[in-house]
Image (cartoon, helix red, strand yellow):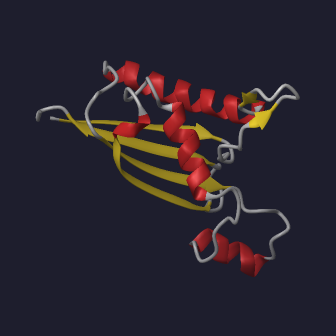
Amino acid sequence: MIHSVQFFVSGDPIGKARPRFTKGGRAYTPTKTRAYEEEIRQACWLEMQEQGLQPTNRRVSVILTAFFAVPKSFSKARRLEAEAGIIIPPRPDIDNICKAVLDGCNGIAYDDDKQVWHLAAFKRYCEAGVPPGLTAKIQWDSSRE
């Protein structure tokens, strides 16, 4: 049986920032990154609860789509190109978006993100009238050993 969890986090997606260090040399995750990972964790947890699912220890497949607001400074022509997917948002890097999502779902959808065997990620600008946000779909097969 294939289990699937899909959730949406509103607002422009945020990539995982590099760790910062205190004067004493202790590493910590920046506040903005921790807050975004917590939003992801909550959205994933709510969907898992609605479906009555527990974190899996199986291999998982993750598909992410990050939708960004089109900057107001874009010309009409450039806005149309952005909405059509011809141009993509330059920042944040897609791998950093993936890291934030995978870390945010640790212990919620799966035991650890080392279980991810397939990852597909896309980033694009929103179409007119569509709010920015991140859609994540996590799937796993529970019928096989």
- Give the percent coordinates (x, y) of residue 132: 65, 50
Q: Residue at x 71, y 43 (%)?
A: 18
Residue 102 sits above or below residue 92 on the image: above
Residue 120: horizontal and vertical position, in percent? 42, 56
Q: In this view, does 77 lie above or below 137?
A: below
Which of the two residues, 91 or 27, is positioned nearer the viewer here? Answer: 27
Q: Residue furthest left?
A: 144
Residue 6 figure quarter: top left
Splitting the image into 4 quarters, where does residue 87 fall?
bottom right
Between 130 and 1, the residue placed more toward the observer is 1
Quarter of the C terminus within the rendering: top left
> In the drawing, does residue 115 fall left or right of residue 64?
left
- Counting from the top left corner in percent of width and height, residue 93 is at 64, 58
> Residue drawn at (72%, 62%), measured in percent from left and top?
70
Task: Give x and y (percent) for residue 4.
Answer: 30, 37
Q: Looking at the image, which residue is at 53% across and 35% down? A: 103
Q: Which residue lies furthest to the front in this view?
A: 24
Figure check: 112 above or below 83: above
**Between 14 and 82, which is closer to the camera in this rendering?**
14
Residue appearing at x 39%, y 18% in the figure: 49
**Quarter of the figure that contains the N terminus:** top left
Horizontal placement of 56 versus 30: left or right?
A: left
Q: In this view, does 1 lie above or below 46?
A: below
In this picture, residue 63 sits left or right of residue 28: left
